[in-house]
Image (cartoon, grey):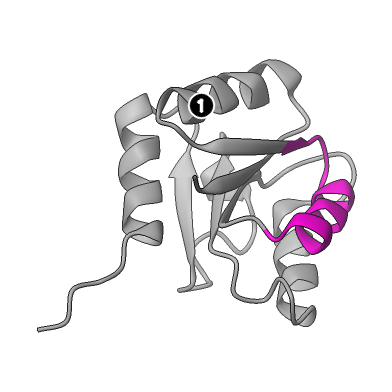
Amino acid sequence: MKKILVVDDEDTFREMVVVMLKKEGYETLEADNGITAFELAKANVPDMIISDVMMYSGSGFILREFLKREQRTTNIPLILMSGKAQTAGAWGSDPDVDYLQKPFTHDELIATIDRKLKPKSKK
């Protein structure tokens, strides 16, 4: 079972994403800020992280920088989500990160996860 860390300081939204993931059979971890998420990622090394961009303690972009600097976490796939994509700063600037505009549908979330987690076929 794949493990996904969901990071969002809005409890209701984070819980909604967790419910969607559990419905699809994923194990989940939760954090309400980037700093806690980084500590959880180091301790548990999830298969993926889905993080909000704008949070009160440690934005999604800061989390990405922390993850890149730690050998155990540098290769964890990351999806960043925001309701304010146009004002989110470096939105779209990292080719290794996928982005989701809030609000998104269950199908959009799962399709984005599948693109990141499923091995690419060799031609």
Q: Can you tell which quarter of the image residue 120 is in?
A: bottom left
Q: Which residue is mark 1?
A: 22
Residue in front for this viewpoint, 49 or 10: 49
Indicate whether 51 appears above or below 9.
Answer: below
Percent position of residue 108, x then y? 33, 36
Q: Residue at x 68, y 15 (%)?
A: 12
Residue 74: % across, % down: 67, 76
Return the residue nearer the eye: 114 or 60. 114
Closer-to-camera residue (49/1): 1
- Residue ranking furthest to the front: 1
Furthest-top residue in view? 12
Question: For the residue marked with disc 1, what is the amino acid?
Answer: Lys
In magenta, the rendered stretch is 30-45
Coordinates of residue 36 in the picture (x, y in percent): 88, 47
The image shows residue 14 at horizontal and vertical percentages of 66, 26
Residue 107 drawn in magenta: no
